[in-house]
Amino acid sequence: MGKQGALRVVFALWTLNALLPVLAMIERSLTPGGHLSFSAYGRLFFWGREWNLLESSLGLALATAVVTGILGLALSLLLARTDIPGRGILSVLFVLPLLLPPTILAYGWSALLERDGLLGKIWGPSGTAFLFSSRGGVLVLAASFLPLILLFTMTSLLSANPRLEEAARLSAKAPRILFAITIPQSAPALLTGCLLVFCLVLGETGAPTFLRVNVFAVESLAQFSAFYDFSSATAAAMPLLLITLLAFWGLHRLRAHRAAALQPVPTGTGLRRIRLGQLRPWFFLPVILLWTALAGLPLLALLIRSLEPAAFAEALTRGGASFGRSLLYAGLGATLVLFFGFLAGYGRADGTLGYGAEAIPLFLFALPGSVLGIGLISLWNRPATGSIYGSPMILLLGLLAQYMVLGVWVTRSALTFIPRSMEEAAAMAGASSISRLTRITIPLASKGLVASWLLAFLFCLRDTGLAMVVYPPGRETLPVRLFTLMANGKPALISALCILILLSAAVPFGALALLFAKSRS
Amino acid sequence: MKRSESLSFPLCLTFLLFEVLFLALGCTSPKKPEVVAYVSEDQVFSEPILKDFEKETGIVVRAVFDTEEAKSTGVMNRLLAEKENPQADLYWANEPIRAEFLKQRGISEPYASPSAEGIPAAFKDPDHNWTGFSARARVLIVNNKASRKPASVEAYLDPAFKGRTAIANPLFGTTTAYAAALFSLWGEDRMKAFFDGMKRNGVKITGSNGESADLVAGGECDFALVDSDDAFNRSKQGKAVIMIVPDQGRREPGVLLLPNAALIIKGGPHPENARKLMDYLLSKETERKLAFADCAQIPLHSGVEMPSYVPRIDALKLMPVDIAGVARKMEAVQPYLKSWSGY
């Protein structure tokens, strides 16, 4: 067994960890009374309203993916490829909402638009009528998930091979180069981001419920919460998973051709930024207004609410330990995701691993955290494995299963831009697999790997669906504590906890800003 | 030689990574006595009680709290999933229907706590599988600026309040219990007619009682049926709202009282400490603390010191329902409620 065998074994280990709990749940959904039955699935579309809910979910997910895709592409180009002022800070500001569960943003908007809120006094009931509708749902979810598109597309734009643009510059003007080369180069990353947004919105229950938008994902939640029926809850998650896999298949078909046409060539020159000249303020203004409209206002509402003398002291007293734990778990979870994701992405890039290395992690990503969590309990809560189930390891195993797709996709995207010939030349010169991996592949893919770790860190940090089902007693994370305190907690305390969550990302965001600053220089 | 290097590197690193994580995060054997409590009562109210228990007994409470996001049933699902190898010692439910449900699933263990003496029989399981304490009432939170003040839940049908009322999704939480109680009291036809009438009168269906209370506090709605702690809480925050205990008239059904409930988990790892915690929760002192807390819960023991704004149980006309009966009705009423709420 050589490199390929080792990669396959590592991926098989991950698959075992990730799929066994899900298979246990699927088996449970097919044998509700102890024998084979499709009744849990048959009941799903018995009534017409399930179809309506599915239609509503698809509409919401599609609209959010399209809106975030359009905004994300424009913003990524401006922030990554132009000299727009304050682009480092703007990048960080736009990524902030990803740290908070969408429900919190909806909560912030609601605080703004209520009768006595900052905007409620101006807009009156029309503001709340807008917020508590599917249009409001698109607004809140787009603000929450736009950062995902930005992280994917900006990473791709910053890692792009500049030689194609340089060659085109000999005969074409900037707009043509933008549409014929720059945008197509980042299209795979953009489409990947859009697909992830689509999946996340399909599975989202908190914000739509808060905004009174009926969606299909609540079917699964209702089966858990109202009926305690694990079989039906798993069955109810399946239609959304099938849609996700279909969307992945479509994307894969699209991306395969794109990737083939864009084999990069090494170059010693850096990317050239588009100079906006005197138009810089005119680009800056709409960008900052967009951020204010999407995220700044609800975050401001949270900040204003948190400005009570004792709020932060109480938040630290009640959530201080959770704050530290969240950082630790998210850091470890992201490291696991990066490690396995890199190896799977590497195996996928060199053809060792098949489509499954992308499709299975996506399937797990789209699975409701509650379903995965109950599956993990079924699998690991045994006397023999009690030391794992009773420790934070169970949460880390869940995070690894759920968010590995981020590691695989970002890594693979980064590896696409490294010419195979470099490794081949090193191999011919006698370099071992490890040397090639550590001296060529990892350094060249380092930006993508850092982006992958950060993205995984953000998702692990904000996770609630999985964490609230499997966190060990007495060891809850900060977002879980936020939700447990939301029930009748003081608004100032809740807002202060939200601000703490935002601050908890200061270190990795600082690293991200440094990365961008370095790439600029 | 180099090939064997390439074989072992990722694999060794994988095992090393897990080994380090396992050693770093694995459970060390506890030095102090402990008890594992799963808690559905709001954390802001329950955590101080558990901290006091820790201080007084030296027993560390490792708690799992419920969340609004999971409709306060995350803990229930966890208890059900862990049934074969229980991790919890005690469950503190925020209403007795769930406790009754766990009893029916064989997850609880009988325990007749000495602290339960003096709690009315209506709030205790006759087999001692669960015991109620400190109750919430299902009340109306009303905006001060509302043109009229409702006195009964039947005001939901009043055209004067058309489009100006809210109710939490009855598929979840205490609103389900209320619907099941009406089902039990009025019968299926009248209960359904009431809910259908509410819908025709433009009731807003919210995600939780807290959201309903916020809609009233923010002036979007005139009134909503919520738990008394939601109403007290908004009032304490200085919102322009009042709380009305509904249906206190002679021909009206009375107010539904939903006590907390404590139960011991069968096969839990620390049964002795679980009983100590249960005794503590059911004590008059805990009821006093919960009466003075922002949830202003109603003590079930007589003679408990309490603030003047908390109604005394003997001063209320209570909805005459049997908890076990309501728990059984819940299963029957849920398909209708699922359809009613649009899911």
Image: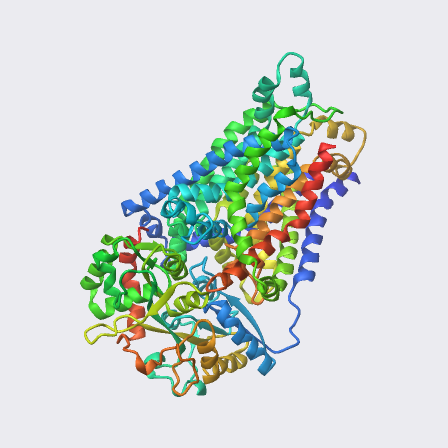
Residue A475 location, quadrant: bottom right
Q: Residue at x 37, y 51 (%)?
A: A219
Colour mode? Answer: rainbow
Please tell me which residue lies in front, A288 or B206: A288
If the image is split into quadrants, where does the N terminus of chain A sit?
Answer: top right
If the image is split into quadrants, where does the C terminus of chain A sit?
Answer: top right
Residue A236 as seen in the image, left or right of residue A411 = left
User: Would you place residue A4 above or below residue B285 in this image?
Assistant: above
Q: Position of residue A186 (x, y in %)?
A: 59, 29
Farthest residue to the top: give it.
Answer: A171
Q: Is residue A494 visible?
A: yes
Q: Is residue A470 visible?
A: no
User: Would you place residue A362 above or below residue B232 in this image?
Assistant: above
Q: Position of residue A336 (x, y in %)?
A: 64, 49
Q: Position of residue A457 (x, y in %)?
A: 62, 48
Residue A83 as seen in the image, left or right of residue A434 = left
Residue A313 location, quadrant: bottom right
Total marks placed: 0
Please tell me which residue lies in front, B306 or A192: B306
Residue A31 as seen in the image, left or right of residue A187 = left
Please tell me which residue lies in front, A234 or A204: A204
Q: Position of residue A429 (x, y in %)?
A: 81, 29
Q: Residue at x 50, y 68 (%)?
A: B44
Residue A434 as seen in the image, left or right of residue B86 = right
Residue A450 location, quadrant: top right
